[in-house]
Image: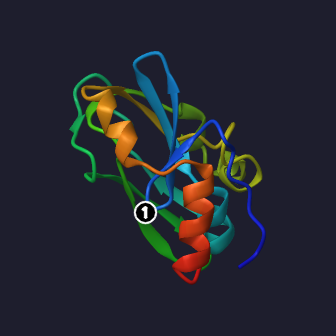
Amino acid sequence: MSQTDQPENLKYAETHEWVRVEGDEAFIGISDYAQDELGEVVFLELPWNEVGTAQFKAGDRFGEIESVKATSELFAPVSGTLARVHETLKDLDKLEAINKDPYGQGWMLAIRMSDPAELDKLMDAAAYTKFLETAGH
């Protein structure tokens, strides 16, 4: 496994999405491990025109990410209403932010959480690191 970064202030899903909570919003992106495995991101499908209307339950598919190596589905780690989408990532020339800064400029969307207790079902950084090691990643 290559050395990847898992910031302590985030929560992680087994499907390799991360969550950063700001107020009642959960900002979501893919982990450093996931972007490292995918390689250069070339396409991103998100619910661009559904802000304020799209509803997700934890585990629902919210999009798709395509790289030079593979295509992967993206899953909501928490339930709620789509609050915002990172509009900059509509521009294919800006997708390198996902590879260069997955926990910062590489965030994808934010969900206004309907059940913040779901965060307790996600892994902290230490548990996610152990998950990567024991899952043979």
Q: Residue at x 31, y 38 (%)?
A: 118
Specify how the rendered protein is coloured: rainbow
Residue 112 appears in the figure: yes
Q: Residue furthest bottom?
A: 136
- Is 107 left, or right, of 36 in this rendering? left
Q: Residue furthest top?
A: 23
Looking at the rendered image, the quarter that the N terminus falls into is bottom right
Look at mark 1 in the image and give the residue it sits on.
15
Which image quadrant is residue 79 in? top left
- Is 104 left, or right, of 16 in this rendering? right
Q: Residue at x 52, y 77 (%)?
A: 70
| In the image, residue 133 above or below residue 121 | below
121 and 51: which one is in front? 121
Residue 77 appears in the figure: no
Number of numbered callouts drawn? 1
Question: Callout 1: helix, strand or loop?
Answer: loop
Task: Estimate how packed mark 1 is, as few (under 14), some (14 to 19) or many (20 or more) residues with alpha carbons within 10 Å.
Answer: some
Amino acid, disc 1: Thr
Percent x, y of residue 69? 59, 80
Percent x, y of residue 85? 46, 32
